[in-house]
Image (tube, rainbow, N blue to C red):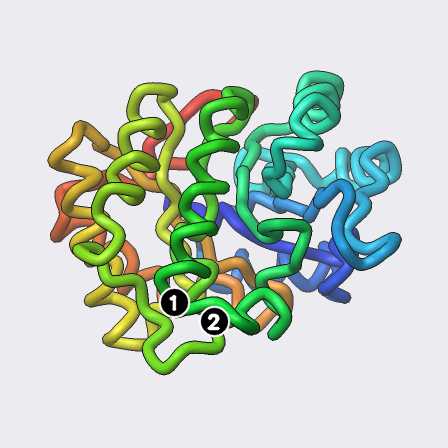
Amino acid sequence: MLFDTHIHTRYSTDSRMTIEEASAQARAQQIGLILTEHLDLKFPEADAFLLDVDSYFTDYLPWRSDTLLLGVEVGLREDVDVENRECVERYPFDYVIGSIHVVDNIDLYTEGYYRGRSKEEAYGAYFNAMIACLRASDYIDSLGHIDYIARYARVDNPEIEYEAFREQIDGVLRLLIERNIILELNTRRLERKAAIDALRPILQRYRELGGRCVTIGSDAHVPAAIGSQMATAVALADACQLRPVYFKQRRMEYCT
């Protein structure tokens, strides 16, 4: 079974989706789900993305099954690494995504991060933060949406040109492989040919350096987005000789 490994329900600040809605949508598509609620400690917006993990497990453990698993998406920052690690080790998550949402204590979603910075400066700082966090964050299973910055960047061409950032992207990919962390193929932007074209050389380089697997996740916050562009992602992974996987009880499983 194919798993959508990146889903946010009402336990994430930016989602109102219920587990009933998510489960029904997955059944209709005959795919598995991993819920990955946001935990972004010290987020610039006060009281945002603070996951009540105890309530999360109390409410959702009865739903846990072979096809509905419980994970978390932690916001990677060097100054919360200890707290992130303690949370991950304390609770029985099936799967842990590590993602960069904040750089220099500025939310990448906001215009303020890009003000006064060239694309080279903004993206360079993003990849440098990713490298620094990956060096410390050996408790995650995958790196979420490497192209996250391209969603929101206030630049003429937001796509990541691999050649322009080759040294830093290679640094990210090498750390993933060394630490046995899987690269996520996020489907959020795969309706755009430009996004596919930008991701392809990154995935090919990941394969060249020794990567063999990817997780595939829609990053859905509403029911209609669950499973979005999964067929496109599978085809892209196959073209780059990468096999889709998911995690259960923190162990990697191959999608079938």
- Looking at the image, residue 211 lies above or below residue 101: above
Q: Is residue 150 left or right of residue 116?
A: left
Q: Quadrant of residue 199?
A: bottom left
Residue 95 in picture, x, y percent from top left: 55, 32
Count of labels in the image: 2
Residue 255 in picture, x, y percent from top left: 34, 38
Q: CA distance from mark 1 to mark 2?
A: 8 Å
Quadrant into which the N terminus falls: top left
The residue under label 2 is 153
The residue under label 1 is 119
Residue 113 in picture, x, y percent from top left: 58, 65
Q: Nearer the viewer, mark 1 or mark 2?
A: 1
Type of amino acid under label 2: Ala
Residue in the picture at 16% in, 31% down: 209
Quadrant into which the C terminus falls: top left
In terms of secondary structure, where does tag 2 sit?
A: loop
Mark closest to the chain's N terminus, 1 or 2: 1
Residue in the picture at 70% in, 31% down: 80
CB contact under 8 Å: marks 1 and 2: yes
Residue 49 in picture, x, y percent from top left: 77, 51
Residue in the picture at 72% in, 64% down: 15
Q: Nearer the viewer, residue 94 or 202?
A: 202
Residue in the picture at 69% in, 32% down: 79
Type of amino acid under label 1: Lys
In terms of secondary structure, where does tag 1 sit?
A: helix
